[in-house]
Amino acid sequence: MGTDLSKTNNSKYITTDPSGISRCSDEFARKLFDNYDLDRNQSIDAEELVKALTQLGQNMDDAAIEKLTSIIAVVDENENQVLEFDEFRNFLYTFLNAKTDDIKSILFFSYDWDQSATIDQNELYLILKRLGCTVDKEQINLLTKQVSDNVDNTFSYHEFLKLMEKLGVK
């Protein structure tokens, strides 16, 4: 699906489940964050991220840098152009799993904050708000009933893609 950092020597810290979703342990995320927060300001900027990913064996060509920039724009919740630890942890999850050139994929993994490989109604509300949609909880409930097959009112990756297509998100 996304980038395979698990092929690095850090594979004991990055796991991939049978469905292909990769997750980074909190311990490893913290270690990376502390190692690459070069100025020790409790945040990582794009330059520090490029260094980190390069040292992890990622080819940081133009496409990878474009992906990195797209993901940062979504996971940077406070829009301060840097990532604090929770944003960085979310960045890693998104970078590992999202398709490079697909905003729907980036949105799914960026807003799956609990890394459950599903989007719940609150996460969906935030995604739609980010996309400029004006929706309320009742409309979210209706969308969920129309698209989600899950009894817990969550969207799998494929259900989310179907919903985004239905809403006209390219």
Image: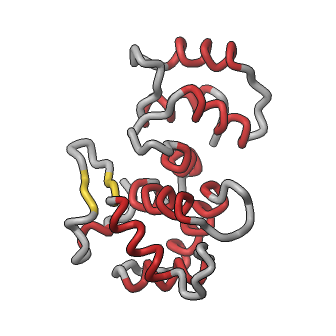
- Is the residue 92 above or below the residue 31 in the image? above
Q: Is residue 63 left or right of residue 116?
A: right
* Position of the C terminus by quadrant: top right
Query: Which residue lies at the image location 26% right of the left edge and 65% below the top edge?
Result: 13
Q: Report the front residue among 158 and 26.
A: 26
Q: Nearer the viewer, residue 46 or 161?
A: 46
**Residue 123 appears left or right of 20:** right
Residue at position x 25%, y 53% from top?
16
Residue found 20% across the figure and 44% down from its top: 18
Is 7 situated left or right of 97 in this image? left
Residue 89, x across and y down, in percent = 47, 60
Is 147 above or below relative to 54? Answer: above
Percent of width and height locating residue 143: 60, 18
Q: Is residue 114 left or right of residue 28?
A: right
Q: Using the image, determine if residue 99 lies above or below residue 161.
A: below
Say if 42 sits above or below 133 in the image. below
- What scheme was used to colour the molecule? secondary structure
